[in-house]
Image (spheres, grey):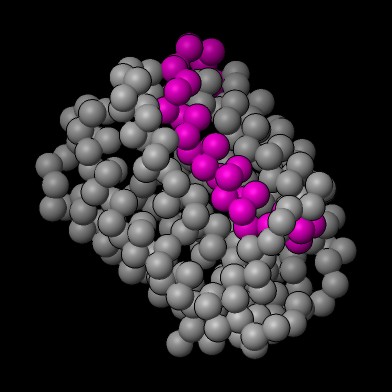
């Protein structure tokens, strides 16, 4: 099965979404941010499972074949540009009242989130699709799956930012960002939410965030279009 990375990534996505739904059903509904953090901590179990499954699928060829490499300057710059743009949104949509200890816990909980999602969506799924189609089409499809994976976790109103960010990260991957840099960028995006409080700008920063993400998508689109054909099959040891 792990020699079929696209199918494996889709199965991991389905299993994770089912497990996440099971956690929500099994636990009392979140009535405040503190209860929400407890529920999120329980979701770490399926996240670690998804991370282990993705890492296992990468083992035959080695994670390096899937993009676990040192970052290039251009790719890393694009990845962190997306991180900065999405982070601006949280100036309008931050939680506001977590304590310092809870913020620290939240930051730690985001580590497996960033790792499994980058290994799955910019690693197995994006690179696996590139074996069958252009890098641009692979980015469009893998980012769509990445966005839908957030169903039930992030409202549909937030999907444009999720999609644009995932697409920019695919462009960064095509420029050689490397999965470690993408994971760090992803971790920073998720972590900063715990530290920024809502400050009543009425969507000013949200609109700026969307504008910057759209601007970052332009070099990502160009990089993906310019990326040559499919890379060597990562199912063979190098």
Residue 129 percent across, percent down from the top left: 64, 75
Residue 118 placement, left or right of 178: left
Residue 105 colored in magenta in the image: no
The quarter of the picture where the N terminus appears is bottom left
- Does residue 173 lie above or below 56 as drawn? above
Residue 70 placement, left or right of 27: right
Q: How many marks?
A: 0
Depth check: 223 or 104 in front?
Answer: 104
Q: Residue at x 57, y 50 (%)?
A: 183
Q: Residue at x 36, y 46 (%)?
A: 153
> Which segment did they paint magenta?
174-203
Q: Quadrant of residue 33?
A: top left
Q: Residue at x 52, y 65 (%)?
A: 120
Residue 121 percent across, percent down from the top left: 55, 62
Q: Residue at x 65, y 32 (%)?
A: 84
Instruction: Work out which residue is located at the far top of the displayed protein and give it.
Output: 200
Residue 83 at least partly seen: yes
Residue 16 at least partly seen: no
Depth check: 59 or 122 in front?
Answer: 59
The quarter of the picture where the C terminus appears is bottom right
Q: Quadrant of residue 123?
A: bottom right
Residue 141 percent across, percent down from the top left: 61, 66
Residue 92 percent across, percent down from the top left: 50, 21
Residue 175 colored in magenta in the image: yes
């Amino acid at each position: 099965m792990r020699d079929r990375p696209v199918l494996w990534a889709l199965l991991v996505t389905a299993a994770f979404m089912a497990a996440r739904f099971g956690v929500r059903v099994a636990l009392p509904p979140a009535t405040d941010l503190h209860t929400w953090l407890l529920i999120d901590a329980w979701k770490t179990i399926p996240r670690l499972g998804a991370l282990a499954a993705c890492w296992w699928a990468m083992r035959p060829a080695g994670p390096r074949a899937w993009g676990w490499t040192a970052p290039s300057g251009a790719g890393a710059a694009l990845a962190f540009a997306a991180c900065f743009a999405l982070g601006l949104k949280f100036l309008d949509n931050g939680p506001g009242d977590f304590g310092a200890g809870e913020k620290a816990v939240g930051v730690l909980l985001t580590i497996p989130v960033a790792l499994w999602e980058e290994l799955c969506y910019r690693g197995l799924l994006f690179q696996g699709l590139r074996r069958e189609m252009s890098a641009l089409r692979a980015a469009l499809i893998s980012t769509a799956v990445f966005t839908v994976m957030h169903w039930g976790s992030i409202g549909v109103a937030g999907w444009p930012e999720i999609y644009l960010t995932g697409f920019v990260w695919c462009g960064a991957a095509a420029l050689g960002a490397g999965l470690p840099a993408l994971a760090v960028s992803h971790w920073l995006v998720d972590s900063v939410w715990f530290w920024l409080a809502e400050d009543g700008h009425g969507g000013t920063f949200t609109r700026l965030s969307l504008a910057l993400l759209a601007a970052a998508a332009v070099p990502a689109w160009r990089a993906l279009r310019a990326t040559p054909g499919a890379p060597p099959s990562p199912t063979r040891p190098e």
